[in-house]
Amino acid sequence: MSAIDARRLAMGAVLLLLAAGAGCAARWTAARGSVGSGLVSKVHYLSPELAGGEIVRVDGLTSQWMEAGRLAVSARIRNRSEDPIALSVRAVFIDRAGNSLPAADDWRLLRIEPQQSIPFEAAAPNALAADYRIEVRRAANY
């Protein structure tokens, strides 16, 4: 093999490695940038009377990647009724395989006055979260 052929072979191997690395980086960027692509609905109303959005509504749902690579979500939860309401709310974070991650903080009790809304924020327990959903139910014993 000539010196030119050896250089071409080496360059081909380098280009192949660079292309493979770029492909991995592109897949990682796409996966990290596609929050929410896996779930049909981001909000799950677990109490049947809340399901239509007539009593409670989750608005302004946003997500972002924090510096440590953890997913953070925020929303406003609105009481659309004429009565105070007590709710239990949590964010469930999901990895790329579709498994729920252990909760950093589980159900939060929220009491919302009539026609008012309050903020809700949560962060994934680690950097494995790729998606999320917000679960809302009536609080027990209220």
Image (tube, rainbow, N blue to C red):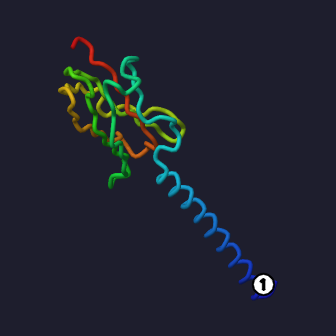
Report x, y in % for residue 41. 47, 34
Classify 24 as above or below 88. Answer: below
Report x, y in % for residue 26. 56, 61
- Callout 1, which amino acid? Asp
State the count of labels.
Answer: 1
Q: Residue furthest front?
A: 82
Classify 82 as above or below 66. Answer: above
Q: Which residue matches tag 1?
A: 5
Q: Residue furthest right?
A: 1
In this rendering, would 26 be left or right of 136? right
Residue beneath the point at 58% across and 64% down = 21
Report x, y in % for residue 1. 82, 83
Foreground of the two, 123 or 82: 82
Foreground of the two, 100 or 132: 132
Classify 142 as above or below 123. Answer: above
Residue beneath the point at 35% across and 41% down = 124
In this rendering, would 15 be left or right of 3? left
In this rendering, would 96 be left or right of 107? right
